[in-house]
Image (spheres, helix red, strand yellow):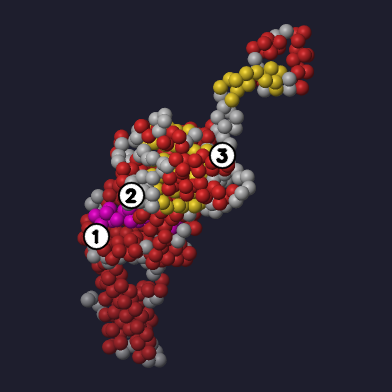
Amino acid sequence: MGATPGNGLDALTGRAATWLGLTTATPERHTGAVVADRFERITWRDTYEQSAGLRELAEELAGHHEHATDLLNDVFLAAYKVGLRLREPTEMDPSRLVNHQVISSLVESPDFAGLRRETVGDPYAAALAVLAQSAALRRLLGRSRDAQDQGERAARARQDAEEAADAVAEALRQAVAAADEDGTVPAAAADAVHRAVETAEATGSAARRAAQNAAQGAAAVPGIRGTAHGAAARATEAVREEAALMRAWGVGSGELERMPFDRRARLAERLRTGRLAEWAELIGRFRQMADGERARKVENATGELVGVTLGDDLSRLIPSELANLGLPELRAVFAARYAAGELMLYDSQGEQSTGRGAVIACVDTSHSMYAAGPGGVTREAWAKACALALLDQARHAGRDFVGILFSAADKVQVFRFPAGRSAGIGQVLDFAETFLGGGTSYQAPLTAARELLEEESDGAAAPRADIVMITDDECGVTEEWMRGWNEARHRLDFRVFGVAVGTPRAAEAGSVLDALCDNLRSVEDFTDVHAAADLFRLI
């Protein structure tokens, strides 16, 4: 061991000075790679408690990595935080260096900025981003076992070094207590200080080597950058797809932000599965088409020329009036007639959009509506997408909407969406998902529609309502019922639009549907949403 140092108290204190207070002077080692405040940590804990998916993923990954929950916390915060900042690797607990490397690689991904545009400030979207990266996290943790082991060894070595430093302080305290008045320390107490210092020196060196190995091991995890970059791209795609799915079904961002986490998760699952997921793209195209038709729709729009009238619309001047502008002696006369609104103009008549009462969509849900057309789109999908676009149309115009699903005479289900209330997504989905099956009866849904309008009018004049009948079948009606129907049309002044889906003969002249409707069309290509474009100009 070389020369034995002196046993004086000053000499012992000088030798132990390096280790005194070392544990309190050592900077805190953090378990989280992302710098977060108290409120952001609370957001993570609340989200974790509400998300069964996050808890299940953490439990699964714990089999690969003891600190998997801390990693998920970091991935969540990296997506959620407004101002993202990562700690330096030297600030990290050695056991979390693999986590830091994963997060650093994720943040450096070219797709990560795009992901954050979808997730910042939205706990649900950030949690979805974490779950979308689960496969990549499994692979990364599987490949990083050696690095994780090195990190754990470094953490234990650091703990040993801190305990050894504490032992030096304790040995010196006992030496001070045992020293005589001139500062001489008994040999046993002095030897204890020397041994404690030697142990601290050895454990400190071991801790430094272990920390260096852990840092190198974390940086050398195979494929960590490529896998993290791919994970960011997949997470971005998943978050955007869900956002598009919500938009297709008319769920706005404001409504989503107010929605409790578990309800939003159930809604997303409902929309991702079954028929609803298959209809999203079609519904989106219907909404886009309807928006365009609403933008074009103008009361008394220019259309077929029907004569000449007087006015001051210079865009409709007849040629002789334009000729007058070319003659200096007639310009004063032209100006006077323009001021009086007495210029000769072309008169035209366009499509009239006069409905202001309820919009009632009667949608056939008989067994034959399951039949698919071009592109695999079913008759039901086209009909329901059209009806949901009509619901939007009514909302934009401040009109009540009623969805009537029907099949056989005894199978009718009515969904009411009053103009003064929000159309809850739950009721919208119930309307979209309900399928009654069975045969087809025209009388049952149209009678229900007529009764609703009679209830609305209550004997007084009511705004003109519009009924849209969407069916794929031909069906007879009784003469007595038809007389009552025609009387109601005259009295209540409603319009009836018909759509025959996949059954052109039902829309032929002289058919029952033709007799029932003021305006009738046939749709055979269910990928074509523009076949119903005129409905959204007229209704």
Q: Earlier in the sequence, mark 1 or mark 2?
A: 1
Is residue 2 found inside the magenta-colored segment of the image? no
The reply to whether the C-beta atoms of the residues labelled 3 and 2 are less than 8 Å apart is no
Q: Residue at x 22, y 58 (%)?
A: 142
Q: Which label belongs to residue 147? A: 1
In terms of secondary structure, where does tag 2 sit?
loop
Measured Cα–Cα span from mark 3 to mark 2: 32 Å
The residue under the point 42% across, 29% down is: 509
What residue is disc 2 on? Answer: 437
Residue 242 on image: x %, y %: 38, 49
Magenta: main secondary structure: helix
Q: Determine the CA span between mark 1 and mark 2.
A: 60 Å
Q: Is residue 421 above or below residue 179?
A: above
- Mark 3 or 2, nearer chain start: 2
Q: Give the range drawn in magenta.
A: 122-139
Q: Residues within 10 Å of mark 1 (few under 14, many from 20)?
A: many
Q: Is residue 135 visible?
A: yes
Residue beneath disc 3: 490
Between tags 3 and 2, which lies in front?
A: 3
